[in-house]
Amino acid sequence: MNAGRSRPDLRTERLRVRFPHVDDAEAIARYYTENRAYLEHFGPSRPDSFYSEEFWRSRVAEMAEDFAADVAVAFFVYRKEADSEVIGQINLFNIARKVFQCATMGYSVAEEHQGRGYMTEACRAVVEYAFTQMNLHRVQAGHLPENLASGAVLRKLGFAPEGYARDYLYFHGKWRDHVLHAITNPDWKDTGV
């Protein structure tokens, strides 16, 4: 349980990668609204309510509950010089403890910020957090086969390809294949799981 752990606020050379606050709801809604068509290519369509500030006020509260229960950690990405504009998001979800000590990582970046290395920089900080602060042994991620940019991010971070999952996720009315990757923590500490 994370009830006593402070919510992450990570700093990199160019970015701030942090857990959301209720006050971020407007910026988060704007990120998803401005990138709606772009992001829906890589994931499911969302109801109109998903793009509202009200939805994100409620969702941020749920994210806090998920963090306290140690089942997920949400991060939103900001450039240091513009820390009120969300340019990306990263989630560690499906956190499993006991003999697995693993999380799945999902991420996205604003279309206008593609190709600048922001996701590599932000995901590197999140993986380090997962390994050093959460003591996870493994972080896994997947991407659509045609999403070469996402695959490049994972390779730069040291994720190893583990296979091709047919019919892995269902969105836009069909099952979509994914390429699966993972990275393990060389400094994992056995705390008596």
Image (cartoon, grey):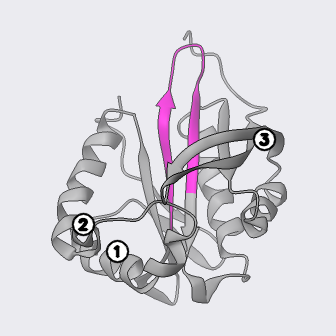
Q: Position of residue 99 (x, y in %)?
A: 59, 13
Residue at left 39%, top 59%? 19
Residue on which disc 3 sits: 164
Q: Residues within 10 Å of mark 1 (few under 14, many from 20)?
A: many
Q: Amino acid at mark 2?
A: Trp
Indicate the secondary structure of the residue bearing disc 3: strand
Asked if residue 16 is among those painted magenta in the image, a careful observer would answer: no
Q: Position of residue 117 (x, y in %)?
A: 73, 76
Q: Quadrant of the N terminus?
A: top left
Residue on which disc 2 sits: 56
Q: Position of residue 56 (x, y in %)?
A: 24, 66
Residue on which disc 1 sits: 28
The reply to whether dot 2 and dot 1 touch (C-beta < 8 Å) is yes
**Of callouts 3 and 2, the N-terminal one:** 2
The correct choice, above or below, for 96 with respect to 14 in the image is above
In-front residue for pair 68/170: 170
